Image: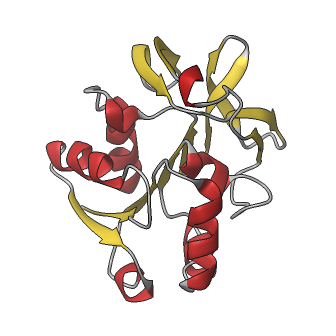
Amino acid sequence: MRIAVLALQGAFIEHEQMLQKLGAETFEVRQLRDWEQPKDALVLPGGESTVQMRLLKELGLFEPIRKAIADGLPVLGTCAGMILLSEGYLGTMHIRVRRNAYGRQLGSFHTTDSVEDIGEDVPMTFIRAPYIEEVTADDCIPIAKVDGHIVAARQGNQIATAFHPELDNDTRLHKLLVSLAG
């Protein structure tokens, strides 16, 4: 199992560590030749979505990544990664996202809640997090809500979370990605 982790900016190392705990081999995608390696899944980490989007385009990664996801490559997008999957960005997931919905860095928080297909008491760390304002097609299903806002959704092989599962010890979301890839 080889999982590509977008490593342009953001919390990519933490995702790699979580996946390696599960026995997956990871590699970092920083340029087009990295992307061209064989892969079974992709992680789009948190960070700054505007910076990541600009770099995806400048480095010629935007279209190959968009096409691979649209063709069924399993992907986990967290925080900024969720924004990248949304309409107006890569556009592979039928969601509209409100960026920085939980405010500034001081508005960051931690909670636990249930996530469909994962279970109860899933730790959720929100850092200047977005949330999903709207699911725009029936094939996209909200799988978690906090305070009435959609904070995770799944569409086929795509999983998007507003929170950072890589910053907690719970590996269940990463296990879901590995199961989709395997």
Q: Residue at x 63, y 72 (%)?
A: 54
Q: Quadrant of the N terminus?
A: bottom left
Q: Position of residue 48 (x, y in %)?
A: 56, 53
The scheme the figure's colours follow is secondary structure
Q: Position of residue 94 (x, y in %)?
A: 76, 48
Number of numbered labels in the structure image: 0
Q: Is residue 81 left or right of residue 39?
A: right
Q: Residue at x 32, y 39 (%)?
A: 175
Asked whether the viewer can see residue 156, the reply is no
Q: Nearer the viewer, residue 172 or 123?
A: 123
Q: Nearer the viewer, residue 69 or 125?
A: 125
Location of residue 79 (image quadrant) = top right
Q: Nearer the viewer, residue 88 or 108?
A: 108
Q: Position of residue 13 (x, y in %)?
A: 28, 53
Q: Residue at x 62, y 28 (%)?
A: 151
Location of residue 70 (image quadrant) = bottom right
Q: Is residue 95 above or below residue 105?
A: below
Q: Is residue 141 left or right of residue 31?
A: right
Q: Is residue 19 left or right of residue 12?
A: left
Q: Nearer the viewer, residue 109 or 172?
A: 109
Q: Position of residue 92 (x, y in %)?
A: 69, 60
Q: Is residue 53 above or below residue 133?
A: below
